[in-house]
Amino acid sequence: MTPRLLDEHSLKAREQDIIDATIALIEKLGVENITMDKVVAAVPYSKGTVYKHFIGKEDLFLAIGNQAMTIMIDLFSRAAQYQGCARERMMLKNISYLIYAILHPSLFKTVQCSKSPNVYGKSSEKRVQEQGLLEGKLMGTILGIIEDAQEKQQLTLPNHMDIMQVSFNIWAANYGIIELLYSEENVCGNAPMVVERELFNQNNLIFDGLRWEPLAEEKNYQQVLESALKEVFPSELALLKAKGREFNFS
């Protein structure tokens, strides 16, 4: 019997099934314990079929990383389009990164794994090229906000840093706060450390340090941020609330 040929939509749906099953395995076992045999056992497809979509575990991880970036691009783009000053939009973008981490914890953990040279070296050229395009879009939203602040003379970069360095340092600081305080059970002395509050505080420290106007003393950014989140991310806030999670910046 001649095998039934699947159309492009069906092929993509099957590939997504494999990706979703792998994400579920990561949630259960951790990314370090994933093998292709475990993936095959978790899906209703043969080993040969799985390998038609992914040439190996690394290629699958890269596909998951690409899916993660697609979600982030949507969130970051919506933040970048918010009708506020550049500093407000950057802060909103940074909080949307936390939203992404809470709603997609396995993707948040896996995406860093997908950045390793070992993963790139063992992935398909198609997948590597796709990631390059997605990274360009992702960085474009971030750099666009900084460039807008420069054009409006709200921000002057330090003499020893270019726009990519400033962007990287903002991202690295945000990632660190989220990674360290993700459980919300962390404490410093006797004070509980709430991740969104400390992310908000950190953003103001960095932006004021850069002299990014308007400064924190000149504007109630907490009020602005709470209003902007309701306007730009209503469905995401509803999902957070369904998980018993509501942001507290005070």
Image (cartoon, rainbow, N blue to C red):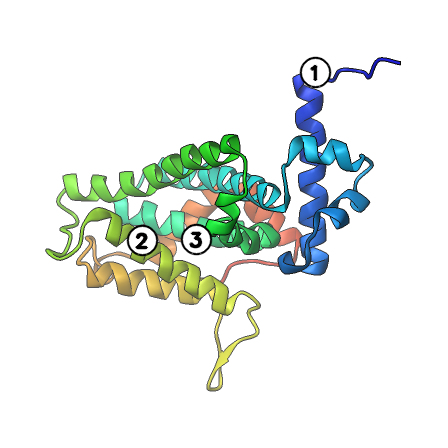
Q: Which residue is mark 3?
A: 95
* Mark 3 or mark 2: whose residue is earlier in sequence: 3
Q: Quadrant of the rendered structure where residue 82 is?
A: top left
Q: Are marks 3 and 1 in contact (CB under 8 Å)?
A: no
- Tell me the SS state at disc 3: helix
Q: Which residue is found at the position 77% from the left and 43% from the top? A: 40
Closer to the eye: label 3 or 2: 2
Mark 1 neighbour class, 10 Å CA radius: few under 14, some 14 to 19, many 20 or more: few
**Position above or below: 198 against 4:** below
Q: Are marks 1 and 2 in contact (CB under 8 Å)?
A: no
Q: Which residue is mark 1?
A: 7
Residue 105, image x, y percentages: 59, 54
Q: CA distance from mark 3 to mark 2?
A: 16 Å
- Please give left or right for residue 87 compared with residue 61 in the image: left
Answer whether residue 56 is visible to the viewer in this image. Answer: yes
Q: Amino acid at mark 3?
A: Ile
Q: Amino acid at mark 2?
A: Phe
- Tell me the SS state at disc 2: helix
Q: Which residue is mark 2?
A: 168
Residue furthest out toward the top: 2
Q: CA distance from mark 1 to mark 2?
A: 41 Å
Residue 203, image x, y percentages: 33, 60
Q: How many marks?
A: 3
Closer to the eye: label 1 or 2: 1
**Position above or below: 17 against 91:** above
> 39 and 1: which one is in front?
1
Q: CA distance from mark 3 to mark 1?
A: 39 Å
Residue 77, image x, y percentages: 40, 36
> 69 and 242: which one is in front?
69
Residue 172, image x, y percentages: 37, 59
Which quarter of the rendering shows the C terminus?
A: bottom left
